[in-house]
Image (tube, rainbow, N blue to C red):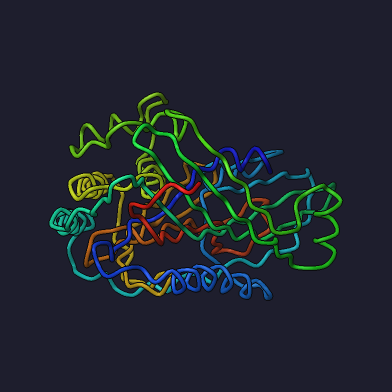
Amino acid sequence: MKAVDEMRHVLGGLDPARGGPPVDEGRRARELTGILATDRRAISVRRPVPRRRALLVAGAAMAVVAAGGVLVEMGRESQPAYAATPVVLAYGPPATAEPAGTRLRHLADVAALQAAPSRPFGTVEYLESANWFLNSASSGQRVTSAVVPEQWRSWRTDDDGGRRVVKSLPPTFRSDADRRTWEQQGERIDQSETRHDFAAGELRPGWQGEVPADVDALHSWLTAGGSAREEPVQYLEDVAELAGVRLLNPAQHAAVLRLLADLPGITASGTVTDRAGRNGEAFSITSSFHGLPAQYTIIIDPLSGAPLGYEEVLTTTAGKLNVTIPAVTSYRSYLVAEYAAMPR
């Protein structure tokens, strides 16, 4: 599980209310707790759910999904007991009859007109999100799953240093037998919090310096120091990560939406209320690039163009992963993106 944690990067959100009245910290804490608690309660029964990006190769002996935080060790003849997952979001008709690309370009224009976030002296980029991950492992013939809600917070300095804090709530299990198996495998069963401090240049190597406000330059910047992207869905995943690790100005934010608009295969999935109760428009790519057919969806605030959330849902088969289709395998709810003081 530690390997997965190291591969995850903190995601946060672009706050659609930035520039508004002062934030009610008590309300923010209650909102975060409510998002995480809702899906912890929802796992008490079996139900279909959305999906998450997984290297879910059906015949693999072991699959690790870095970006989504799904860890799956599969026995050759595992007999899964189906794990409950979060309730699938309900999507209404698209906001307009426009093609997805046209609508995203309109939202990019909306984003470009927003006021840049004010930056008090001595502050850094601060991002916060509520997240949910399905973690599974096998022992012999038995596949065991745990639901792991997490709170992510990050502070980024101008020289690409800073701090990351991940608070993991206690995993929730389908049965006492699953809990015992999980413990026997040496996995964590209690609440935990990890803190990592980064020197200059260490926070998210590869995505350093100013985020380009030009679409072509943004393409190159996203792949700098790594391999070229093979499929459009990889750029959607990049955008989902970028939304949580960098606080974007209006021009940069608009460039991100225009990049999405240019992706082959992107569709308008409809209007939706996200997991924090906010109204949004969803845009998706369906792909088997990571092994199994899945839908990758980003939710955008139509009033500000800001991303509200990101979801991954297995759509037709789970391979050997013990979930019921359709199945949400992860989600990210972006809550805060603003300038704040670096904590001591």
Return the x and y of residue 289 as percentages of the image width and height: 47, 41
Asked where in the image residue 226 lies, by quadrant, the reply is top left
Return the x and y of residue 273 as percentages of the image width and height: 38, 73
Position of 252 relative to 111 (above/below): above
Q: Is residue 314 visible?
A: no
Numbered marks: total: 0
Q: Residue drawn at (18%, 67%), measured in percent from left and top?
A: 97
Return the x and y of residue 71 as percentages of the image width and height: 65, 46
Return the x and y of residue 10 as percentages of the image width and height: 48, 47
Q: Residue drawn at (19%, 50%), measured in percent from left and top?
A: 250
Asked where in the image residue 75 lies, by quadrant, the reply is top right
Q: Residue drawn at (51%, 63%), measured in percent from left and top?
A: 50
In terms of depth relative to the viewer, which is nearer, 200 or 103?
A: 200
Q: Is residue 40 visible?
A: yes
Taking 65 as reference, is 232 left or right?
left
Quadrant of the image containing the N terminus: top right
In terms of depth relative to the viewer, which is nearer, 156 or 114?
A: 156
Taking 235 as reference, is 195 left or right?
right
Q: Residue drawn at (74%, 65%), measured in percent from left and top?
A: 173
